[in-house]
Image: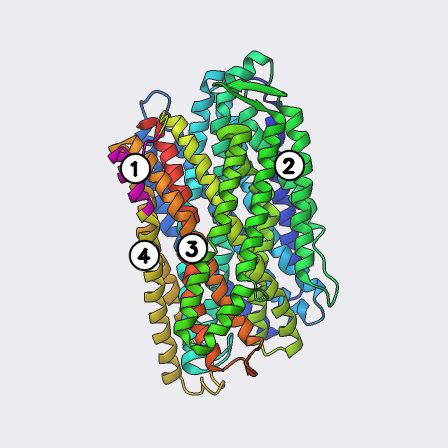
Amino acid sequence: MENQTILYAIPVSGVLALIYAFFKASWISKQPEGTEKMSKIAGHIADGALAFLKREYKVLVIFVISVAILLGFANSGREGTSPIIALSFVVGAFCSALAGFFGMKVATKANVRTTNAARTGLGQALNIAFSGGLVMGLSVVGLGILGLSSLFIIYSQMFPALTQVSEVINLISGFSLGASSIALFARVGGGIYTKAADVGADLAGKVYEGIPEDDPRNPATIADNVGDNVGDVAGMGADLFESYVGAIIGTMVLGAAFVPVFNTMGVNPVIGVTLPLIIAAVGILVSIVGSFFVKVKEGGNPQTGLNMGEFGASIIMAVLSYFIIDYFLPASWTVDGFTYTSLNIFFAVIIGLVAGVLIGMITEYYCSTDNKPVIEIARQSITGAATTIISGLGIGMMSTGLPVLVLSAAIVASHYYAGLYGIAIAALGMLSVTGIQLAVDAYGPISDNAGGIAEMAGLPPEVRERTDKLDAVGNTTAAIGKGFAIGSAALTALALFAAYRQQAHVTSLDISEPIIMAGLLIGAMLPFVFSAMAMGAVGRAASDMINEVGRQFREIPGLREGTAEAEFAHCVDISTKAAIREMILPGLMGVLVPVVVGFISKDMLGGLLAGVTSSGVLMAIFQSNAGGAWDNAKKRIEGKIEFNGVVYGKGSDAHKAAVVGDTVGDPLKDTSGPSLNILMKLIAVVALVIAPLL
């Protein structure tokens, strides 16, 4: 391949991200932990989180080795394929797991230091919590771009002919498969862990025992705090790592179609392939710059500081994208009768960025404590748990409308401007500043942990007030992050779907054909069965947790009075065992179903991809928003709500009904809902990887 000089600068951005992440992690470690009791509680959380990751990764090592062997064997001796794809798979899995480990390790250090900083003020507490999230964000994008670009450089040297570009990209698709596999297990396993602990702690503590949230007498509180890290930090990081890598690879596959035309025009023939890497590399630098805008003064609103960083980075990225695309791409070119222009490619990037912001804003509307949907659920809680559940389900279903319209408009508009390549690069535009977007999202669970530590350590009320202020913003950023993750997953899955059609030579899909309709229906069914598996797993584990909490209150003298310490390790062990045991079957389903369907018919697999994407997007939005609305309805009542002259707050019947709603919503918004993002992308990536074999 020719003119690859620009490629060698791309891994540098990944290295810079990792260096800055290391600098931030070192700075966090130097901040004081606070009192001995605070340090001890934080130690329990860190030990539990690392113990879970170690046990999870032991299982995943066996899975990765097994799949790598199968991949290598299946791609041996076939024209256009190579067993080297197994190496890409292993590297992708390793980078994804490593990013999760780095992020979670620092998050468990940042939580107690955020609590300690909140003892004196809000500004430094925000700085530490956000810095902890930034380590997660930069680890994801740094390892993602470093791994992808390095493999592309190596494989380009091994296969230098321009006609071998598609083969090089096919080998790299193994990297995305590795990332997707780890992501699904991390999201499902982490989600089961965190919600088994959360549901168990909430029901056993607030409903059955009548003690406050994060009360140190509750044996499940440490497991709950551990869950925030393994589910909402490591799990979300793995989710967006997969979206980030998938969007880049999907765009690279479609950009390979430009190679012959660019070669005749005297343009860098593989620039359509390398452009997504360049945009992602610049996005890393923009995310680092954006992080300097995140500040808050004492008495200020942390949301304003976080918005400054996130939206500021998006605006800078939009401007830079114009100059990048204008510099590297020709003014216009034609492929298969479709005329592309550099300006239209830029429009597609902007469409992706705008769609991501709009979906986040819509999600915030449905989940924010200050808006009508959440207030309506809170009021319905006055008449009991049944009406709480009914109203939450209705709002969750209604919340699918606007995001789907935004996604549909983004798909149609980006395709109008730049064909299938436009859809793929719109997904990349949405994910271009993933570094800071994930930092803002991971900030939430760190703040949540900080509040829990403040409560358990018995710190003064003003400390908990500051951490609650950070946590309230964290709930909003988490809801926005989930909406963003769903939107990016939908566009990424569609980009990978288009890439599969190109690699498998599937020209069109006629749903009147029985084989394609069958695939469509099977695909639409998968999110429901997958969600049922995840929900059932949480229910079983939570039941075990509740029984264990009840046992400890009965059998440990002085626990209820606060004179004895709970056996936290037993609850951590229950969540860990349940998560490891229950994550296997859903994970295998995501890998095996597309393989089986693909070898029946590649057209049937195309139908399956369409079905799982359509159903998965709707189910993911519904579950995430219903759960988020229930959660904040409970918080709204805890902040006191007046209806017909009566004030309802903590301990009221309305609050107990809202706790039930929140408990039902927990596995929806933090286990099955977010995991569907990965299911959609994993099935699409598996299809892309096996496409040359079909």
Q: Name the residue under label 4.
A: 533
Q: Could you say which is closer to the camera, residue 297 or residue 457?
A: 297
Q: What residue type is labelled 3?
A: Gly
- Secondary element type, mark 4: helix
Quick check: 389 left or right of 373? left
Quick check: 684 left or right of 137? left
Rate crowding at label 2 as few (under 14), some (14 to 19) or many (20 or more) other CA atoms within 10 Å: some
- Secondary element type, mark 2: helix
Rate crowding at label 3 as few (under 14), some (14 to 19) or many (20 or more) other CA atoms within 10 Å: many
Residue 47 in sight in this render: no
Which numbered tag is attached to residue 673?
3
The earlier-in-sequence mark between 2 and 1 is 2
Q: Separation of disc 4 and disc 2 at Cα?
A: 40 Å
- Secondary element type, mark 3: helix
The earlier-in-sequence mark between 2 and 3 is 2
2 or 3: mark nearer the eye: 3
Q: Which amino acid does label 4 sit on?
A: Met
Q: Mark 2 points at which residue?
A: 282
Q: Separation of disc 1 and disc 4 at Cα?
A: 20 Å
